[in-house]
Image (cartoon, rainbow, N blue to C red):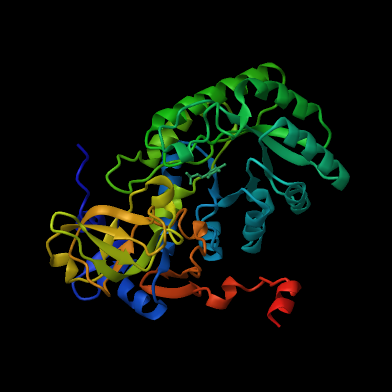
Amino acid sequence: MTRPDPDPLHLLASRPSLRMDVHSGLLFEDVPLQILARDLGTPCWVTGAGTLRRRVRNLRSAFEAAGLDVGFHYAMKANDHLATLSVLRAEGCGADVVSGGELHRALTVGIRPDRIVFSGVGKTDAELKFALVQGVGQINVESAEELVRLSALAGTLGATARVALRVNPDVEAGTHDKISTGRAGDKFGIAWHEAPALYRQASDLPNVIPVGLAVHIGSQILSPAPFRAAYGRVADMVRALRADGLHVDIVDCGGGLGIRYRDELAPPPSALAGAIQETLGDLDVALAIEPGRWIAAPAGVLLASVIDVKKQPDDVPDFIVLDAAMNDLARPALYDSWHGIVPLSPERAQEDLIPQTVVGPVCESSDIMATARPLPPLQRGDVVAILDTGAYGAVMSSTYNARPLAAQAMVEHGQWQTIKARQPIEALWAGETIPEWLDRETA
Ligand SMILES: *Cc1c(COP(=O)(O)O)cnc(C)c1O
């Protein structure tokens, strides 16, 4: 038996940034979302700056309570809006970047290069050079080939690269197949048995300095056990490398801590801190983590309007067609993910719930936000908030079906501001050209 879906009010009870007000409807950090939907239109993403801050502080206090001094490198692929990055920079986060574009963004908001870690399974020469010229603090190398190439590139620039080897500890993260990254067959990281020799090679190569090990085993991990297993293996490798006379100063523990989207028993940050403390706490290494989802996901909602209600026979849930779709929020189509859906209106919150299937208008059968979800009977014109979409939400949007990228706003303490205008429709074909010979044909 599958567990029943939590109802909207139950979802709000465990989300302190959201509150249903009897007059203004759903509030996010004390901003009535109905006002945002009216002024900005839908679909529209809303990011809560206060929620971002609170999450970072919660995470930090968990590590402090465990007696650990841990550097935070926010994994900016989760949500790379400049406003989000500014908030997190102000909260003392560095950045984990996985492309030259992300590096550029991080530098644009003033994140110091020495607080940036460059990860990623395939870095081009141009990206590595850019990182070297900017003086990025740490480059996480993912293969022998990349290590040798980086050494050569650094040589041509007269630079020295501080590198960590991203190792693949071959552990099962117990998460969705498409977000597991630390099993032997995954494309990520250096194979376990090859890592020691490569670390030795790195210490012999010119223009690179091996500073430590990095590991990232997946995302939305819901138990401390895989973390403990991975970090335990890394600790063994640190000891083995040191026994061979090599210097290991840093362990980068990656990201992956899961959150409660539906009714998951997500581990508290103290469980992650405990896993790190137990395994790596006595190694005298500088520790760092790369959280993305845990910080950003609960700090965002996606607002969408009901554009049609498609009635179905009695025993079949009606289709509620939203103006937000898989091109906006890809996660349900990509990972079968579950997101809470809460109507904004205070009246709807009083009504009885009936199962409804919430879909987007894109021409794909996978464009389903929720199946047979208990919701008050939705009508055309109702606006809903799709919860916990602050991570891997707007960053994954596409313009499929010629749908412009949605507007974005930021809220905090009852104030709000547009942080990205809805993409103008003409922008969709700006830069496209029609070959001259086709022009001649139509002339
Ligand atoms: C994606 C990623 C992260 C962040 O993962 P979350 O699950 O969002 O915390 C951290 N490190 C690396 C190398 C990543 O690729």
Up/down of 198 relative to 20, above or below: above
In the rendered image, residue 89, in percent from the top left (x then y), is placed at 56, 58
The quadrant of the rendering that contains the C terminus is bottom right
Total label count? 0
Q: Is residue 76 left or right of residue 324?
A: right
Farthest front residue in view: 441
Instruction: Out of 42 and 14, give the one closest to the viewer.
Output: 42
In the rendered image, residue 21, in percent from the top left (x then y), is placed at 22, 70
- Residue at 38% in and 56% down: 367
In the rendered image, residue 49, in percent from the top left (x then y), is placed at 44, 63
The quadrant of the rendering that contains the N terminus is top left
Instruction: Out of 225 and 149, give the one closest to the viewer.
Output: 149
Instruction: Out of 390 and 358, give the one closest to the viewer.
Output: 358
Up/down of 385 relative to 136, above or below: below
- Residue at 55% in and 24% down: 235
**Residue 297 visible to the viewer:** yes
- Residue at 51% in and 34% down: 217
In the rendered image, residue 61, in percent from the top left (x then y), is placed at 42, 45
Instruction: Out of 398 and 10, give the one closest to the viewer.
Output: 398
Q: Is residue 107 left or right of residue 132?
A: left
Q: Quadrant of residue 239?
A: top right
Q: Quadrant of residue 314?
A: bottom left
**Residue 56 visible to the viewer:** no
- Residue at 33% in and 53% down: 339
